Image (spheres, grey):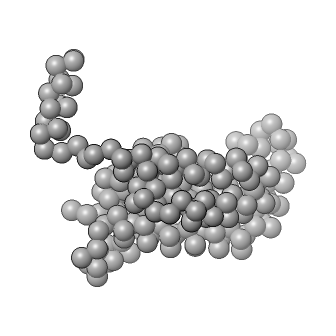
Amino acid sequence: MNTLKNVCIEAELNTLPIVVKYDSIWTQWLDAQTPLFSQVLINKPDREPILLLLGLLTKSHIEHCSTLADNRQAIIAMLDAIEGSVGHKYSDSFQQQDLISLQLITHAWLYVQGSLNMDFSLANDHALSTATQVSSITQQDIHELRTQYLESYYKGKERRAKPPVTGFRQWLYRLIAKSQR
C-alpha cells in the first residue's frame, strides 16, 4: 500500500538527521498531508509515488516559505523577547516551530531532488533562498545553512547510487546478519 508514510520510508527520508531529531514535527506533517497524498495517488495512478512526494514537498515548501515570510516580524519579536527574559545562553532551548518546519521540509525536499538526480543548480538556488530567509530571522550564516541543506541533496544522490536491496540480496543480507549474532 502506497501511503505517504510508506513512500517516505521507502525513500529513506526517515534516516535524515533532521527528521530523526524532529520526529514529532515530521509526524505532524505526515498526518496533515496524508489525505491530500492519498487523493493524488487516486487521481494520478500512473505516476511514480516518489514524483508525487516531490510535488507534495514542493507545495509544502512554498507554503512554509510563505508562512515564515508572513510571520517574520512576529517571530523575530518573540525570539527577542525570549532572549531578553532568559538570556542568550538559554534562549536556544526555545524553538520556533515555523522555522523548524521550513528547515525540515527543505531538507526532505532537497533529499528527494537528489534521489531523483535533479539539476543541482536548481537545488542550490532553493537552498540559498531558504537559507537567506531563515538567516534573516536567526542571524545564522547563510552559506552555512545552504551547505547544511545541500548535504541532504547529496545524501539523496548517494541513495540513488545504491542499488535497492531486494530478493536474493535481501535474503543473503539477512542470512549473513543472523550468522554474525
Residue 129 falls in image quadrant: bottom right
Q: Residue at x 84, y 54 (%)?
A: 80
Q: Residue at x 29, y 68 (%)?
A: 48
Q: Position of residue 177 (x, y in %)?
A: 21, 25
Q: Would residue 29 be visible to someone looking at this image?
A: no
Vertical side of 73 occupied by 173: above or below: above
> Which quadrant, please, contains the C terminus?
top left
Specify the farthest residue to the bottom.
43
Residue 31 falls in image quadrant: bottom left
Vertical side of 133 occupied by 70: above or below: below
> Which quadrant, please, contains the N terminus?
bottom left
Q: Residue at x 72, y 51 (%)?
A: 143
Left or right relative to 121: residue 68: right
Q: Would residue 64 be visible to someone looking at this image?
A: yes
Left or right relative to 129: residue 28: left
Left or right relative to 166: residue 128: right
Q: Position of residue 44 (x, y in %)?
A: 28, 79
Specify the farthest residue to the right.
84
123 or 137, which lies in front?
A: 123
Vertical side of 59 occupied by 7: above or below: above
Left or right relative to 89: residue 158: left
Q: Position of residue 138 (x, y in %)?
A: 76, 53
Q: Position of residue 38 (x, y in %)?
A: 31, 72
